[in-house]
Amino acid sequence: MKVILIGPPGSGKGTQAMMLKERYGAAHISSGEVLRREAARGSELGSRIAVFMARGEIGPVELITEAILTHIDEQAPSGFILDGFPRTLYQAEELGKRHDIDAAIFIDVPETVIVDRILGRRTCGGCGAIFHVRTNPPAREGVCDICGAPLTVRGDDNEETVMNRIRVYKDETVPLLDFYGAAGLLRTVDGNGGADEILSRIEAALPRA
Ligand code: AMP
């Protein structure tokens, strides 16, 4: 299975990718996680991109594309669920040179919902699990249900950066809908509602093996 999840920030791509991973055993690659780890390691790439991530911008697209494609080659050459990549037409074209994609799932959520989801989001620093203070709180406040590590607010999950991320999404990522639509690979899924409900819709949209 080579599947891409497309959607605005806060549409639930990460949550759904994790659920799909658990269900199908497919590798989940989150470009945001890969880049956050690089930034935390202080590698040359990480230091360069940290400033763009803090602003919700794309940054040096060729460098990032190469880093993510290399990560895919190393971690999941034969199947993956991609979350956050590709994010631009250039990235989609480069990915297409190396991989035949089975489906691009667009998780469709209105802007009012995504801002609330992002501002209430809590992310596990250990395993990357995602919670929400109101709609999906952990059993113990501030502690991950899955691995017990502390939950944090991502540095870019604040009101100012969110608006910039939404703008970047509209300018850079929305064109991918036409790109994958023209290729006959786009499946649009209603992203409103609970995580289990949305998962069922995605499963119904996945190509049959
Ligand atoms: P995300 O975890 O998908 O919300 O991504 C967080 C931030 O990482 C984004 O706002 C970008 O700054 C950066 N980022 C993630 N994926 C990509 C990508 N495919 N290309 C460029 N930057 C990315």
Image (tube, grey):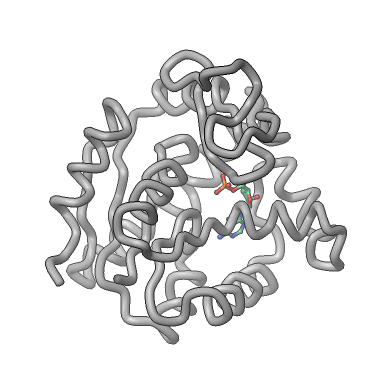
Of the 4 image quadrants, the one containing the N terminus is bottom left
Taking the image as shown, residue 26 lies to the left or right of residue 70, namely: left
- Residue depicted at x 86% and y 67%: 44
- Residue depicted at x 39% and y 23%: 113
Which residue is farthest bottom? Answer: 97
User: Residue 121: x, y in percent?
Assistant: 55, 27
Q: Looking at the image, which is closer to me, 186 or 81? A: 81
- Residue depicted at x 31% and y 44%: 107
Taking the image as shown, residue 91 lies to the left or right of residue 140, namely: left
Residue 121 vertical position relative to residue 79 in the rendered view, above or below: above
Taking the image as shown, residue 169 lies to the left or right of residue 100, namely: right
Residue 80 vertical position relative to residue 40 in the rendered view, above or below: below
Taking the image as shown, residue 24 lies to the left or right of residue 154, namely: left
Q: Looking at the image, which is closer to me, 172 or 48? A: 48
- Residue depicted at x 45% and y 54%: 173
Q: Quadrant of residue 154?
A: top right
Q: How many numbered callouts? A: 0
Q: Looking at the image, which is closer to me, 204 or 66? A: 204
User: Residue 117: x, y in percent?
Assistant: 47, 25
User: Residue 194: x, y in percent?
Assistant: 29, 27
Q: Looking at the image, which is closer to me, 4 or 124? A: 124
Q: Quadrant of residue 208?
A: bottom left
Of the 4 image quadrants, the one containing the C terminus is bottom left
Q: Quadrant of residue 126?
A: top right
User: Residue 164: x, y in percent?
Assistant: 61, 36
